[in-house]
Amino acid sequence: MGAMLTGDAIVALVTLTAMEIVLGLDNVVFIAILTGRLPASQQAPARRLGLTLALVIRIGLLFAISWIMGLTAPFTTVLGHAISGRDLILLGGGLFLIAKATWEIYDKVEAEHAETAPAGQRGALLWVLAQILVLDIVFSLDSVITAVGMASQVSIMVTAMVLSMLVMLVSAGPIGGFVERHPSVKILALAFLLLIGVMLVAEGMGSHVEKGYIYFAMAFSLFVELLNLRYRTTRNPVALHHRFEDEGQ
């Protein structure tokens, strides 16, 4: 415990916690979109269970760090490119995320049945949790490797993961509600997941993508969308007022 009270340990803990929160945002968005298809009574428990599974998986992988590091060792070569277990996990997770985000965008934009289907038939709880579990494994792998690179003590890594997960548990509900209330934000969130899927596929194929550029693009796009939401909110009452004036004349 004393080792965690030193200046360097506190700085590492704060930095790693912030990094884990940032890395976990895509997981929160994915869970919010998936649980949005469940009946209202099941959404909050499904979000909590999904994030709890993510925490358990991350801590489990952290204590199996020697196995995780072994995943980075190439075991075969395809067309001159060395393939490791980590590459296969990232590639599979990226393809799954691309397929899922693409289908959700199509379902939201084109499919008529999405608006009329009863909420209880939109997705079974177990199927939603299975999808969350698959992506938890992929996102947790990236999170654990980042944690190992930023801290040397397992206690600091575990504490940072628990703190970041508490923040995500508190924010998952408001984020999910906000995404569901604003269809354009949901489409943007799905586009983010599509972008992350492409990044995972690129990483799995050996092409490193600087995550800072990805997160900056996402933050800028979200900022523009929030401005659009603000504009529509302030403009609609004015337009409605003019409409009533025209009808009165």
Image (cartoon, rainbow, N blue to C red):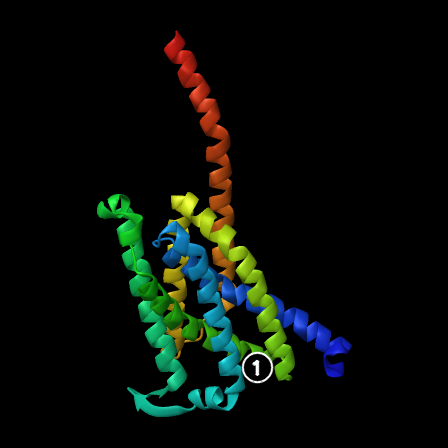
Say what amino acid the circle numbered 1 marks.
Val
> In the rendered image, which quarter contains the N terminus?
bottom right
SS under mark 1? helix
From the viewer's side, name the closer residue of 72 and 26: 26
Up/down of 204 relative to 33, above or below? below
Q: Residue at x 54, y 77 (%)?
A: 146
- Residue 46 x %, y %: 42, 61
- Residue 91 x %, y %: 34, 76
From the viewer's side, name the closer residue of 188 and 28: 28
Say whether residue 145 is left or right of residue 108: right
Q: Quadrant of residue 78?
A: bottom left
Mark 1 nearby-residue class (10 Å; few <14, some 14–19, many ≥20): some
Outermost residue on the front side: it is 41
Outermost residue on the top side: it is 249
Q: Residue at x 52, y 59 (%)?
A: 216
Residue 172 appears in view: yes
Up/down of 83 relative to 208, above or below? below
Q: Residue at x 41, y 82 (%)?
A: 86
Query: How many marks are shown on the rendered structure?
Result: 1
From the viewer's side, name the closer residue of 60 and 76: 60
Residue 220 appears in view: no
- Residue 212 x %, y %: 53, 65
Up/down of 46 relative to 134, above or below? above
> In the rendered image, which quarter contains the C terminus?
top left
- Residue 33 x %, y %: 39, 56
- In this figure, which residue is indicated by the disc labeled 1? 148
From the viewer's side, name the closer residue of 179 and 184: 179
